[in-house]
Image: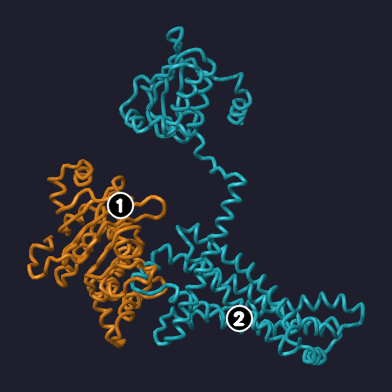
Chain colours: A orange, B cyan
Amino acid sequence: MEKSMADKPDFENVPIISVKNLTVGYGDEPIIKNVSLEVLSGEVFAIMGRSGCGKTTLFKAIIGLLEPEEGEVFIDGDKVLPITHGGAQPILRKVGVLFQSGALFSSMTLAENVAFPIRQYTTLPESTVGQLVGLKLSEVGLEGYEKLLPRELSGGMQKRAALARAMALDPKILFFDEPSTGLDPLTSRELDQTIVKINQALGTTIVLVTHELESVFRIAARVIMIDGAEKGIIAEGSPEELRDHNGDPRVKDFFNR
Amino acid sequence: MGRLLDRLKLAFGKRKEIPIPRDVCAPRESWDSTDLRETFCISVENRTFDTIWVSLSGKMFMDNADLVREELLAIIRTESLKNVVMDMGQVAYLDSAGAAILTDIYRKCKELNNTVKLANVPERVTNLLEMVDLEHFKESAILKPREAPGLLVQIGEGAEKLYANAKDIVIFIGAVAQAMGQDLIRPRKIKWDRLWKLVERAGADGVPIVAALSFLMGVILAFQAAIQLRKFGGNIFVADLVSVSICLEMGPLLAGMIVTGRSGAAYAAQIGTMQVTEEIDALRVMAIDPINYLVAPRILAVALVLPCLTLMADLMGIFGGCLVAAFSLDLTPTTYFNQVRKVLEVSDVMKGLGKSMVYGIEIALIGCLRGFQVRGGAESVGGATTSAVVTSIFVLTVTNAVFSLLFHYVPKLWSG
C-alpha cells in the first residue's frame, strides 16, 4: 500500500485546513483545549486517539457542526462558520463527509442519496445526474444496487454508498468519521483501498478520524494523536515515527498494541 | 415428592436443621448433574481450636451459586468465633458468581471479626479471582433504581425545563417563520422533502379513520341528544345540535386529535430518528437547512390537509346524526336535512375550517420541534413522540378555547 505524499510532487504541499487555537466543549468543561494543526493539500491525514478522547468533537468542530468556544478553522482560505449560523456555503461545496453511521437518507434509494448533493449544488440535467450517480456507485463497487433503500443493504454496503454520496461532487476534502466501524477486516481494507485510489486519482485531501491502527499504517501519511486527559494533541508525525521514535508512554502503548 | 419435602424442610428449618456435612466429600469424575445439590460438596473440619477448614469441591457457578452461598454462610454463622480457611483444591469450576460468593463470605467474616483465607487455589481460579477487585463489590446498591431528587429539586428542575422548553419553541417558530418567509420570496429555490407524499400520508391515508370516527361521533351525539329532546318533543332539534356542534367544535377537534396521533407522532419519530442516525447532520453538512427541508413541507401539508379532513368529518358527522334521527326519532332524512340547512350557517362551517387550519400548523410544528429535541437513542425518540402528542392535545384545546372567546367577543366589538 503506497502512501500518498511521496509520489505526488505536482500537488503543492500547502495547508488546506488550518486549525488555530481551537477550544470546543458541550457545556461546562471543554473537551479539547487550544488545539492547532494543519492539513496539507493532497495528503491523507489521520486524527487518532482512544475512544472518548475528543477526536469526533475536533472533527465536528472542523467541519462546522459544533461551534467552538475559542479559536478558528480555515478551510481552503475561507473561515468555517458554524452550521447553526448558516454555515459557509463555499466551504461546504468543497467538502464531503462520511459519517460513522453512514447517515444515508433512509427514505431515499441509493441513487437518490448520491444524487442529492449533485442536485443541490449544480444545475446539471437529470440525465447527466443519473450518469454521475451510476459512475460514483460503481466506483465503490455498488453497481446494480442503485434502486435499493439503505435498510435493504448490509452495513458495509451502506458505508460504501455513503462514501459515494460524499464523493459525488469530487470534493477537495473528504472527511471520514470512524470509517471502519462495523466493518469486517476485509471490507475495511477494501474501503481503505478505495480511499487511496481517490486520493491518488484526484488529489483529494483525506482527513480520517479513527482508532484503527491497521488502516492508519496502510494509508495515512501524517497522524496526530489526541489525548482525553490532556485535551489536546500529544503527538504528531508519520505513523512509523509515532510507533518507533516517540517517547511518550501513552503514544507508545497506543501504537504498539 | 421426597425431594420437594427436603427443599421445604431446608427453607423452614434454616435456623435449626442446617445439614453441615461432617464427612469429607468423595472426589468425583464429573460434577455435572441435573440436581444442583449434586454439583458441589462442602465439608468442614475443625483443624485447630480457632480455625475451621472448609473444603469446597465441585462447581461454584451461576446455577448453584445461591445454594453454595446459603450453605457456606450457615457454616460461618454457626462457627462464628472461628477463623475460616477455604480449601479450593477440589474446585472443578468457578465463575464470576463463585467470585461474588467468596466476597460475600469475606464480608461476613469481617463482620464477625474473623479472617478468611483461601488455600490450594487452582491456577484457573487464581486467574479469575485476580480480575476481581473487592472495589467492584463494594457498592451493593448498584441495582437499586436511581434516587429520585427531592420535591423541591424536582420543582426547580421542572421550572427550568419549562423555561428552556418555552425558549426552544419560540426559537423554533422563529426559524420556521424565517424559512417559510424565504420560500415565499424565492419559490424557485424551494427544496422540499416531497410535499405530495406528505399530503398523501397525512391526508389521504387518514380518510378512513376520520370518516369512521366522525360518523360515530355524529351517531353518539344524536343519540344522547335524542334522549333529552324526546322529553320536550323537540326531536327535530337533533339536527340543529348535531350539525352546529360538529361543524363548530367536534369536527375540527376530532380531526385534529386523529391527525395529532397519526402525523404529529410520526413527524416527531421520523425527525427524532434522523437526529439519532446523523441524517440531520448530513443535511447540514450539505448546506441544507433541515428546518426548511423537513419542517416547512410538513407544516404546509398538514395545514392544507386538515381543513379537508375536517370538512369530511363534518359531513360524516351530520350523516351519523341522520341515521339516529331516522331510526329512533321518527324523522325522515328529508326533514332532518332541511332542518340542517335552515340552521347551519356557512360561517359556522368556515369557523370550523379556519380553526382546523390553525390546528394543522400547530400539530406539525410541535411534532417537528419534538423531533429536533431528541438527544440520544430509542428512549429519547419514544419520549419525543409521546411529548409531541400530549403537547399537541394541550395546545389544540387551548387554541379552541381562544377561538371560542374570539368568535364570541369579536363580533360584539365589531358591531359596537
Image position of B269 with respect to A231: above or below: below
Residue A121 seen in the figure: yes
Which amino acid type corresponds to the residue marked 1 in the rendered image?
A: Lys
Residue positioned 57% across, 45% down in the render: B148
Q: Where is residue B194 in the image (x, y as percent from the top left)?
A: 45, 81
Which percent across, then down, holds residue B158? Answer: 58, 54
**Rendered view: A120 above or below A214:** below
Q: Kindly identify which chain the residue marked by label 1 belongs to.
A: A
Mark seen at residue A44? none
* Residue to which mark 2 is pinned: B357
Q: Is residue A182 visible?
A: no
Q: In this view, does A66 lie above or below B325?
A: above
Q: Tell me, for residue A33, which label it has, or none.
A: 1
The answer to whether residue B353 is left or right of residue B323 is left
Q: Which is closer to the viewer, label 1 or label 2?
A: 1
* Residue that protrudes farthest toward the front in the picture: B416
Image quarter (top left, top right, bottom left or bottom right) of the N terminus of chain A: bottom left
Count how many numbered circles sit on residues in the image. Answer: 2
* Dot 2: chain letter: B
User: In terms of image quadrants, where is residue A249?
Assistant: top left
* Residue B173 x/y as whole percent: 52, 72
List x then y, in percent, for residue B249: 71, 78
> Separation of disc 1 and disc 2 at Cα?
50 Å
B6 or B199, which is in the foreground? B199
**Is B136 rendered above or below residue B410?**
above
Left or right side of B404 for A190: left
